[in-house]
Image (cartoon, rainbow, N blue to C red):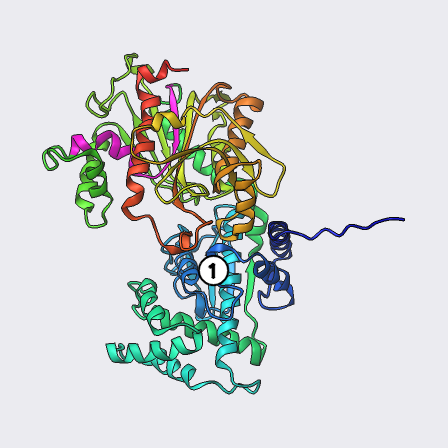
């Protein structure tokens, strides 16, 4: 007699399966070249996203529209995309030389072009992760649009509710809405969105932009209008991938060009054979840590170090930031604005020219030719981290000769989601686990938890998971990784990709020192396990200033202080 034991899948297993189907489907659709997101071809993608119910998309599986998730998505998509029926993903195909004005989303560095009233082109130069990011956001957007459509249609003949008609009047009105008209429109909009007037009023300003303060009303109207046209007139929205993008993807075209430009500049300034320290970070923390106090000493007397950095982080202090930049440039900093399409700018600091007062630690006593060179690269995006780091660590070819990079250390600092703390905390990884694969990358991190003791910041240490996309994470999967023997402390998008490139260059290709030092540290931007603490709940504000500069200082101590260098 055989006994069959049925196994009920957990939510974490269902969610993991949904993520796998999403990525397989997106690759299939990309290879196919086009698909209709709300048609049969997009069905698997929609169903999987609804099963997954990512934290960042909030109430995506409910009838009411998700407002915070909508803010998050619209900040990362180009202005006016809700009006477009045709979305075309392209490579860098020369549109910058056309009359089309580039549209750059508020929270994503990508060039987009409005071709006509119906078509938006989105330029993809940062690899597959960028495609996944765009497609998941668009899928969320179109699911929400059909939720609007179901609320405003009375019957299948196309009769619409009065609330919708009043919204339409407000949006199509040529004159600017006064306060009374705005609140009337919001009242009608709240009715069919299943939200209170207070809720829509709270998010109204979050959607506003320089182009249009009434953007929220237009987004809701054009999303609903597009869904109604799909349902009644079969005018399906269409996403296409240009042949050039499909041909170029995965070939490191932009990363190779980016790395060559950097190495050419360094070769021309005789820096390639100097001790080189690569830091992946933002474009301000290293420069400010090195030069802010010297540049601003007359204005900022007796101010604490953290107060100086908080002051520099405020949007209205551009003149102070320019003064620091001028000081840094006069002391050997070179700024390389990206022209390769990677959207990764670079700063090169020649510490032989920096002067004794640039960092209030003991300076190294090497000869000028042995002084360190610090190369700061702006943040990569997902898989782009592998492309850029892999190309950067390759030898530089001059004529028939190969010149090897004298890399002594690589430091990665960035934002990440935390699973055992809150916003502003610091995470020190001991390994990176690559989600959806059997790949994991343990490494010896030269930054350790005890180095941050007494600094007034909560610090945790352990493994981190490199996710395929922040917009696809759900609580069940993250809870499993956190509470199981994996003991994961946080999630981010680039760590495993960087480690793959570093280990390939140092352990396999031999193009850099096999014993180079690595420093990894992240500061928490959100906790996706806590309700109201996801990325969709808003930015860090000044909360991120202290951990950002604390991590920067610890990395620079490792690079510049001879005392720290002797610690094994």
Asked if residue 39 lies left or right of residue 113, the reply is right
Q: Is residue 132 visible?
A: yes
**Residue 506: horizontal and vertical position, in percent?**
52, 23
Q: Is residue 313 above or below residue 513?
A: below
Asked if residue 281 lies left or right of residue 302, the reply is right
Q: Is residue 386 above or below residue 351?
A: below
Q: Is residue 450 magenta?
A: no
Q: State the image quarter where residue 370 is shown.
A: top left
Asked if residue 541 lies left or right of residue 527, the reply is left
Seen from the viewer's position, the closer of residues 368 and 534 is 534
Seen from the viewer's position, the closer of residues 69 and 3 is 3
Count of numbered tags: 1
Seen from the viewer's position, the closer of residues 124 and 43 is 43
Which residue shows up at 90% across the image and 49% down it? 1
**Residue 8: horizontal and vertical position, in percent?**
69, 53
Q: Is residue 353 above or below residue 157?
A: above
In the orientation shown, which residue stands out farthest toward the right? 1
What stretch of residues is rendered in magenta?
274-295
> 10 Å neighbourhood of mark 1: few (<14), some, or many (≥20)?
many
Q: Is residue 387 visible?
A: no
């Amino acid at each position: 007699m055989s006994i069959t034991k049925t196994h009920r899948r957990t939510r974490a297993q269902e969610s993991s399966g949904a993520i796998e189907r999403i990525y397989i489907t997106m690759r299939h659709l990309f290879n196919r070249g086009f698909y209709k997101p709300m048609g049969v071809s997009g069905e698997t993608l929609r169903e999987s996203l609804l099963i997954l119910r990512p934290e960042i998309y909030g109430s995506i599986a409910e009838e009411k529209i998700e407002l915070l998730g909508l803010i998050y998505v619209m900040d990362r998509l180009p202005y006016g995309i809700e009006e477009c029926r045709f979305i075309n993903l392209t490579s860098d195909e020369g549109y910058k030389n056309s009359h089309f004005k580039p549209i750059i989303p508020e929270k994503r560095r990508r060039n987009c072009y409005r071709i006509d009233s119906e078509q938006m082109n989105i330029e993809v130069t940062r690899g597959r992760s960028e495609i996944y990011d765009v497609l998941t956001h668009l899928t969320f957007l179109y699911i929400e649009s059909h939720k609007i459509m179901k609320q405003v249609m009375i019957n299948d003949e196309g009769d619409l509710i009065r609330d919708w008609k009043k919204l339409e009047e407000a949006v199509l009105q040529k004159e600017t809405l006064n306060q009374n008209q705005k609140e009337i429109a919001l009242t009608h909009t709240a009715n069919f969105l299943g939200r209170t007037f207070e809720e829509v009023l709270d998010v109204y300003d979050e959607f506003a932009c320089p182009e249009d303060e009434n953007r929220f009303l237009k987004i809701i109207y054009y999303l609903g209008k597009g869904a109604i046209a799909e349902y009644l007139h079969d005018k399906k929205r269409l996403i296409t991938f240009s042949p050039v993008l499909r041909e170029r993807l995965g070939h490191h075209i932009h990363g190779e060009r980016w790395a060559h430009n950097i190495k050419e500049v360094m070769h021309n300034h005789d820096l390639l054979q100097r001790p080189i320290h690569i830091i992946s970070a933002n474009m301000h923390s290293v420069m400010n840590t090195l030069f802010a106090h010297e540049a601003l000493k007359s204005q900022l007397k007796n101010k604490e170090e953290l107060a100086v950095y908080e002051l520099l982080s405020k949007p209205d202090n551009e003149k102070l930031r320019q003064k620091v930049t001028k000081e840094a440039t006069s002391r050997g900093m070179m700024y390389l604005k990206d022209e390769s399409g990677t959207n990764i700018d670079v700063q090169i600091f020649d510490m032989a020219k920096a002067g004794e007062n640039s960092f209030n630690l003991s300076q190294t006593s090497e000869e000028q030719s042995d002084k360190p060179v610090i190369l700061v690269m702006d943040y990569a995006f997902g898989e782009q981290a592998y492309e850029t780091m892999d190309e950067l660590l390759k030898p530089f070819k001059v004529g028939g000769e190969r010149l090897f990079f004298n890399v002594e250390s690589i430091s990665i600092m960035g934002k990440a989601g935390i699973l055992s703390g809150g916003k502003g905390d610091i995470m020190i990884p001991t390994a990176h686990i690559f989600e959806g694969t059997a790949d994991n990358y343990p490494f010896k991190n030269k930054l350790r938890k005890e180095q941050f003791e007494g600094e007034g910041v909560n610090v945790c240490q352990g493994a981190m998971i490199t996710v395929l996309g922040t917009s696809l994470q759900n609580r069940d999967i993250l809870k499993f990784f956190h509470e199981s023997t994996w003991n994961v402390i946080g999630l981010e998008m680039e760590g495993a990709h960087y480690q793959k490139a570093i280990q390939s260059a140092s352990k396999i290709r031999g193009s850099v020192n096999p014993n180079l030092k690595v420093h990894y540290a992240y500061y928490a931007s959100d906790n996706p396990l806590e309700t109201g603490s996801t990325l969709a709940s808003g930015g860090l504000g000044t909360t991120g200033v202290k951990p950002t500069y604390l991590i920067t200082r610890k990395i620079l101590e490792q690079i510049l202080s001879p005392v720290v260098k002797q610690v094994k």
